[in-house]
Amino acid sequence: MRAVVQRVSDARVSADGDPLGAVGHGLCVLLGVAATDTEPLASKLAARLAKLRIFPDEEGRFDRSVVDVRGSVLLVSQFTLIADTSAGNRPSFSAAARPEQAEPLYEVVAAELRALGVSVETGRFGAHMEVALVNDGPVTIVLDVA
């Protein structure tokens, strides 16, 4: 699984003009699921996201997690994160999980985050979505869990 994690002061997602989810202070997480990913990996990723210390403490050091700051997570599926660009100019998505495998794992990540006390908003799996955000910092972390 691969997640692009952005610390945000505001993030929202819509599809076909319909608002789907929005958060204030917290994280926008773009999630790619590979064909080799499993439910235990989805749970592991959720735990890492909840504990990822990318919020500043009183001294400005990255020492607080989204749980610590009582932030929210906007979780958006994005299979293109699993692209292979090693050959040519057209990305290959053959390593990405098929929707029938990826969607349940995406849902596991959301459910596990909620179980850890994080408020979670989501996009619409498989839809063409528009994501708008204000990156706070900016802080962007690529998180691979294998």
Image (cartoon, rainbow, N blue to C red):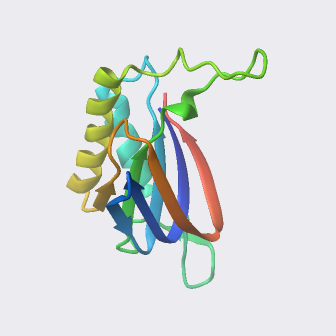
Q: Is residue 103 above or below residue 63?
A: above
Residue closest to the far front: 16
Foreground: 17 or 106? 17
Name the side, left or right, on which 95 lies relative to 106.
Answer: right
What is the number of callouts on the image? 0
x, y percent for residue 49: 43, 51
Tell me the residue at 21%/53% (across/down).
115
Tell me the residue at 37%/31% (across/down).
41
Tell me the residue at 49%/47% (across/down).
30
Foreground: 34 or 76? 76
Residue closest to the far bottom: 58
Q: Is residue 62 above or below residue 110?
A: below
Question: In which image quadrant can residue 86 be found?
Answer: top right
x, y percent for residue 68: 39, 71
Q: Is residue 38 above or below residue 2?
A: above
Question: In which image quadrant can residue 119 be found?
Answer: bottom left
x, y percent for residue 140: 62, 57
Query: Does residue 65 appear in this view?
Result: no
Tell me the residue at 54%/78% (across/down).
57
x, y percent for residue 85: 71, 23
Q: Is residue 15 above or below residue 144?
A: below
Query: Does residue 9 appear in this view?
Result: yes
Question: In which image quadrant can residue 107 be found?
Answer: top left
